[in-house]
Image (tube, grey):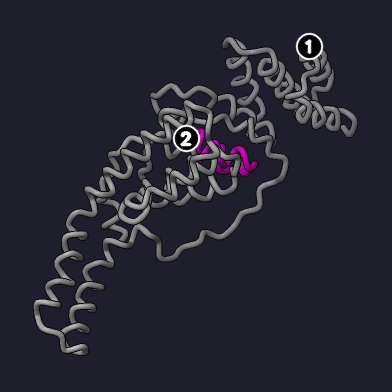
């Protein structure tokens, strides 16, 4: 079964390549509590179940119900046709879903995404589990359910059998960062930075996760300085300065931390980081 999943083509372009919601908008304030992965029968197994279900139904109709053979054929032919056409049904359902999602996001209607996902029966029934989980993760993320999105991205990551596409790594990293699973976010962001693809926000989020976890603070400071040199709106620039201040405070360099806190000014979006910084300066 594992080898079969590894051979499944994952060629459909996902809407997460078109839009990746910034994780900072979710304002996650709770810590990460790891949960054991949940496995079980999924709707993606429907196609694999069609053949044994058809055989069982034909056996019951012919031998138990003692119906004529033409009744058996009338039952078997539609089931076999559905089995043969399932990949095409899934492909068209995915394409239609992606098109509609882009339109809904462009119209500012993310709340309509769960209903559209529920109507994508071809995708939910017959698409490879990794593609289906990836789209469910996007729907959850766009509606603010970062924990649900993280679980779905984790499923997509596992279903891609060790070689997930870049979009899945990126979504999984952002969702892990949003729920404060800093060790996993750091691991994933480092993998993303090792690629040659420019990904806005990845280095900033990696530095943020390093500062938050207290790991590799000097490296985080270097990253934050690079991020500060890029054009950014004032709240973002203030956030970067405050993150540098937190890193200096954790390194015991309180004077420099206070200087940066003063330079950053006061912004509503940075209240949480400022509160953490003030606590560090008061307790150390």
Q: Position of residue 35 (x, y in %)?
A: 59, 57
Q: Which mark is residue 71?
A: none
Residue in the foreground of this view, choosing between 202 and 93: 93
Quadrant where the N terminus sits is bottom left
Residue placed under numbered mark 2 in the picture = 170
Residue at 83 percent of width and 18 percent of height: 258
Point out the residue furthest to the right here.
282
Magenta stretch, overall SS: helix
Residue placed under numbered mark 1 in the picture = 263
Residue at 31 percent of width and 38 percent of height: 95
Residue at 46 percent of width and 46 percent of height: 136
Tell me the SS state at disc 1. helix
Q: Position of residue 193 (x, y in %)?
A: 47, 28
Q: Position of residue 101 (x, y in %)?
A: 43, 35
Q: CA distance from mark 1 to mark 2?
A: 32 Å
Range of magenta residues:
172-191
Q: Earlier in the sequence, mark 1 or mark 2?
A: 2
- Residue 174 covered by magenta stretch: yes
Asked whether the viewer can see residue 157, the reply is no
Does residue 162 lie above or below 208 as drawn? below
Residue in the foreground of this view, choosing between 208 and 218: 208
Residue in the foreground of this view, choosing between 136 and 155: 136
Quadrant where the C terminus sits is top right
- Residue 246 covered by magenta stretch: no
């Amino acid at each position: 079964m594992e080898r079969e999943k590894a051979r499944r083509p994952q060629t459909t372009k996902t809407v997460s390549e078109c839009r990746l919601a910034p994780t900072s908008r979710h304002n996650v304030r709770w810590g990460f509590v790891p949960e054991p992965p949940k496995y079980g029968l999924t709707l993606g197994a429907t196609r694999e179940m069609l053949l044994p279900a058809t055989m069982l139904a034909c056996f019951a109709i012919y031998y138990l119900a003692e119906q004529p053979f033409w009744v058996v054929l009338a039952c078997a032919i539609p089931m076999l046709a559905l089995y043969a056409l399932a990949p095409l049904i899934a492909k068209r359902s995915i394409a239609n879903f992606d098109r509609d999602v882009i339109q809904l996001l462009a119209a500012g209607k993310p709340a309509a995404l769960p209903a559209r996902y529920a109507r994508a029966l071809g995708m939910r029934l017959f698409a490879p589990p990794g593609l289906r989980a990836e789209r469910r993760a996007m729907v959850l993320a766009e509606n603010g359910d970062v924990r649900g999105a993280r679980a779905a991205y984790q499923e997509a990551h596992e279903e891609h059998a060790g070689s997930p596409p870049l979009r899945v790594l990126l979504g999984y990293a952002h969702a892990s960062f949003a729920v404060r699973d800093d060790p996993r976010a750091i691991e994933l962001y480092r993998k993303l930075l090792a690629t040659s693809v420019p990904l806005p926000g990845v280095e900033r989020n990696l530095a943020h996760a390093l500062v938050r976890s207290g790991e590799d603070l000097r490296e985080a400071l270097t990253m934050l300085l690079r991020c500060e040199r890029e054009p950014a709106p004032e709240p973002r620039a203030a956030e970067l300065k405050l993150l540098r201040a937190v890193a200096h405070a954790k390194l015991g360099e309180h004077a420099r931390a206070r200087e940066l806190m003063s330079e950053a000014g006061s912004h509503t979006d940075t209240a949480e980081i400022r509160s953490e910084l003030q606590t560090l300066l008061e307790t150390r």
